[in-house]
Image (cartoon, helix red, strand yellow):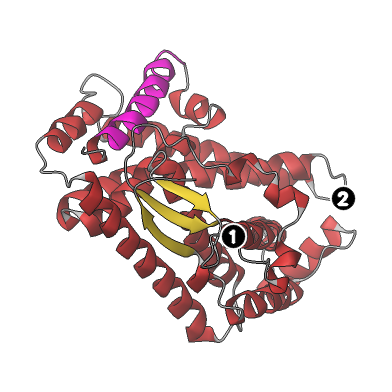
């Protein structure tokens, strides 16, 4: 059975349904942002990244870039819009800072509207998804058993690249965006791929030779919080029609999820300062250091400065990676799941 094309078509259909509704709106880009178009784009970008490794690198990289363009713009809208809404509720933050962020969000929405038409997602020439489906239908897809082995190799490669990325700095982060945010992105893809492949990746428990579950490694306990273990994002899609599976160790997947969540909180805390710094420097002649000091003052409360955020990120990453948790994430492949 060949599942590759059905995975793409499923997420393309999800995206097409949103685009069809968006085209009837006065502001399609805004409507897509408000109706979570970023999710199917994440799924499609993830599939394209994976199949560029499994299949035709040139063709799938081109597909990935098309999905990434829209997803990046939606991410930029979310960045400015989310902080604008948050800051609007804080009387300590000057109104012109909030207005600047609101204006940036509107500008990004306009960029999205232009990209949708220029790239034939919407408008008189709308045929982007039809073209993609045609090209996908012409490809020679792997059979399920061979494909799942390739997916396993891809996962190992992705994990190796993450370990190398952190090893370059020895967990001494110097920038919220290029270090903390980028590491979180890389880790997050490991949790997006299982959703994208729609059941071909499942969670399982490591077992002893007698078939009994292995005892919980004590170092993992700190990651297995109720927030993580009960999260709907950590539930794998139903196995569906899949006949071959990549198995990930459940508790190590939970540890990965904990890291993504914690880095997300630190990233947001840092970008909160960065967004105000940007606004202040665009609105007046002020140094970066002074703008960051004012940003921290405006936010108030227990807002840490950038160095404190980077130090916290250093600490949790050093512990997580020295425990070699990513290396223990993959159990193997199987033709049945239990």
In the rendered structure, does residue 14 fall within the stretch colored magenta? yes
Residue 102: x and y, percent? 63, 39
Residue located beneath label 1 in the image: 212
Q: Main secondary structure of the magenta part?
A: helix
Task: Name the one closer to the observer, 22 or 115.
Answer: 22
- Sequence-wise, the earlier of marks 1 and 2 is 2
Residue 72: x and y, percent? 44, 48
The extreme front residue here reads 210
Q: Nearer the viewer, mark 1 or mark 2?
A: 1
Give the residue at x 37% y 68%: 156
The correct choice, above or below, for 297 with respect to 160 in the image is above
The extreme right residue here reads 301
Q: Quadrant of residue 7?
A: top left
Task: Name the one closer to the observer, 191 or 312.
Answer: 191
Neighbour tally class for label 1: few under 14, some 14-19, many 20 plus, Cα within 10 Å: few
Q: Specify the segment rendered in magenta.
A: 6-25
In the rendered structure, does residue 48 fall within the stretch colored magenta? no
């Amino acid at each position: 059975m060949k599942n590759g094309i059905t995975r793409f078509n499923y997420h393309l259909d999800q995206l097409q349904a949103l685009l069809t509704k968006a085209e009837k709106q006065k502001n399609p880009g805004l409507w897509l942002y408000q109706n979570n178009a970023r999710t199917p784009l994440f799924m499609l970008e993830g599939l394209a990244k994976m199949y560029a490794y499994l299949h035709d690198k040139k063709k799938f990289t081109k597909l990935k870039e098309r999905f990434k363009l829209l997803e990046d713009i939606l991410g930029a809208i979310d960045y400015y819009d989310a902080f604008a809404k948050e800051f609007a509720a804080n009387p300590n933050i000057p109104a012109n800072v909030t207005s600047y962020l609101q204006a940036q969000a509107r500008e990004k929405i306009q960029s999205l509207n232009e990209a949708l038409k220029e790239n034939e997602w919407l408008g008189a020439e709308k045929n982007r998804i039809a073209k993609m489906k045609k090209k996908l239908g012409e490809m020679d897809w792997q059979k399920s058993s061979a494909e799942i082995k390739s997916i396993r190799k891809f996962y190992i490669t992705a994990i190796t690249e993450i370990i190398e990325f952190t090893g370059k700095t020895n967990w001494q982060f110097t920038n919220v965006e290029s270090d903390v945010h980028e590491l979180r992105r890389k880790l997050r893809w490991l949790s997006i791929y299982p959703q994208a492949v729609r059941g071909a990746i499942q969670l399982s428990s490591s077992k002893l030779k007698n078939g009994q579950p292995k005892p919980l490694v004590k170092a993992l306990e700190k990651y297995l919080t109720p927030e993580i273990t009960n999260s709907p994002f950590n539930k794998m899609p139903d196995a569906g029609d899949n006949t071959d599976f990549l198995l990930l160790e459940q508790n190590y997947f939970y540890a990965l999820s904990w890291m993504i969540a914690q880095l997300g909180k630190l990233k947001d805390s840092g970008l909160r300062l960065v967004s105000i710094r940007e606004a202040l420097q665009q609105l007046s002649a002020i140094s970066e250091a002074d703008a960051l000091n004012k940003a921290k003052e405006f936010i108030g409360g227990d807002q840490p400065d950038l160095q404190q955020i980077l130090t916290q990120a250093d600490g949790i990453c050093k512990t997580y990676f020295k425990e070699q948790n990513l290396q223990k994430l993959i159990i193997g492949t199987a033709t049945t799941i239990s």
